[in-house]
Image: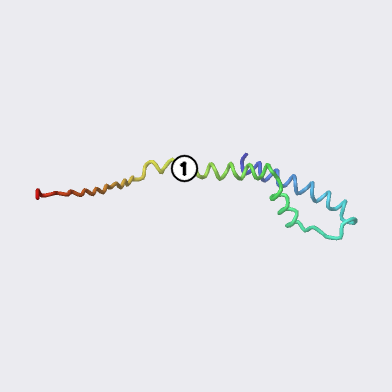
Amino acid sequence: MSIATIRLVILYLLSILSISISIASPLQTKRATLLSVYHDAVLYNSDIAVAKADFEAKQEATPQAMAGLLPQINVGGSLESSRVNIRQPD
C-alpha cells in the first residue's frame, strides 16, 4: 500500500468520522476534535497499521542487503592444560 493510498484512506475515514460525530454530537457530552478523530483513525485502523509495517519492512531491506558488503571479523581461541606426574623408582 503506497503512501498516497494511506492518505486517501485517512481522508476517507476522517470524512466518515466527522459525519458521524456531527450526527451523534447532540447525544454525546464529550466533543471530538479533528486531531482526536485523526488520532483514533490512525490508532485503530488495521489497513494503516499494515501499510506502516510494510513500509518499515521495505525501509529495512536496503540496510540488510548492504550488510553483506561490510567487513567480517571472526575471533577464535583455544586453551589447553596438561599435567604430567613422573614417579621416580624407590
Which residue is found at the position 87% from the left and 55% from the top? 25
Kind of residue at disc 1: Thr
Which residue is found at the position 9% from the left and 50% from the top? 90
Q: Nearer the viewer, residue 85 or 58?
A: 85
Residue 43 pos. (x, y %): 69, 50
- Image quarter of the N terminus: top right
Q: State the colouring used for the structure image.
A: rainbow
Q: Which residue is mark 1?
A: 62
In the image, is residue 33 above or below residue 85? below
Residue at the far right in the pictured view: 26
Residue 13 pos. (x, y %): 75, 46
Residue 47 pos. (x, y %): 68, 42
Which residue is found at the position 27% from the left and 47% from the top? 78
84 relative position to 9: left or right: left
50 relative position to 41: left or right: left
Residue 63 pos. (x, y %): 45, 45
15 relative position to 60: left or right: right
66 relative position to 33: left or right: left
